[in-house]
Image (spheres, grey):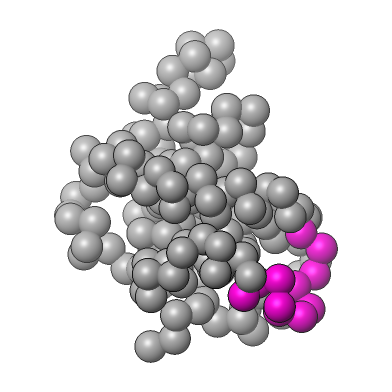
Amino acid sequence: MSAVIDATALKNSPQKSPRHRARELALQGIYQWRVSGTDASDIEKHMQGEKNLGRYDKPMYSKLLRGVLAQHADIEALLTPYLDRALEELSTVEFSVLLLAAYELSQQLEVPYKVVINEAVELAKTFGGTDGHKYVNGVLDKLAPKVRAVEFAAR
């Protein structure tokens, strides 16, 4: 099994915003870390050597990748109460998408929770299994009110 998400899916995707591309690339890095145990520095070096990545928000990509990998244990603990199975039983894509989205929900408070959830669902649709996006959506819908209580109260 390859330690990278299918690069053709990234290259053949329609024109995406630089922020969405940063999330796609961060997802690819998280996936690589999950499969091979590669650290953030090596993943970033590998990514810098890639051609045809398109326009992406490089600082956002780095912040997401490094943040998720540095805090993965805390993020996993945050997610666990909302899962119907053990983390190890999730597909690698679902696991990676949930880690990325939970990090954004808990640490990137300037990004509206609806944007985080929508982006995660789109990533799961693009890279995950047939109904993986539904599972991702369900988990994040339960997590969001807990980590974004202030934002929910203001609605």
Tell me which corner region of the image, top left, top right, bottom left or bottom right, holds residue 37: bottom left
- As drawn, 80 above or below 143: below
Q: Is residue 123 visible?
A: no
Residue 43: % across, % down: 55, 68
Residues shaded magenta: 46-56
Q: Nearer the viewer, residue 137 or 20?
A: 20
Residue 92: % across, % down: 36, 68
Residue 51: % across, % down: 76, 80
Name the dominant secondary structure of the magenta segment: loop
Tell me which corner region of the image, top left, top right, bottom left or bottom right, holds residue 81: top left
Image quadrant where one finds the C terminus = top right
The verdict on residue 69 being magenta is: no
Horizontal relation, residue 6 to residue 16: left or right = left
Horizontal relation, residue 71 to residue 121: left or right = left
Horizontal relation, residue 151 to residue 46: left or right = left
Q: Is residue 129 visible?
A: yes
Horizontal relation, residue 21 to residue 134: left or right = right
Q: Residue at x 65, y 54 (%)?
A: 61
- As drawn, 15 above or below 2: above
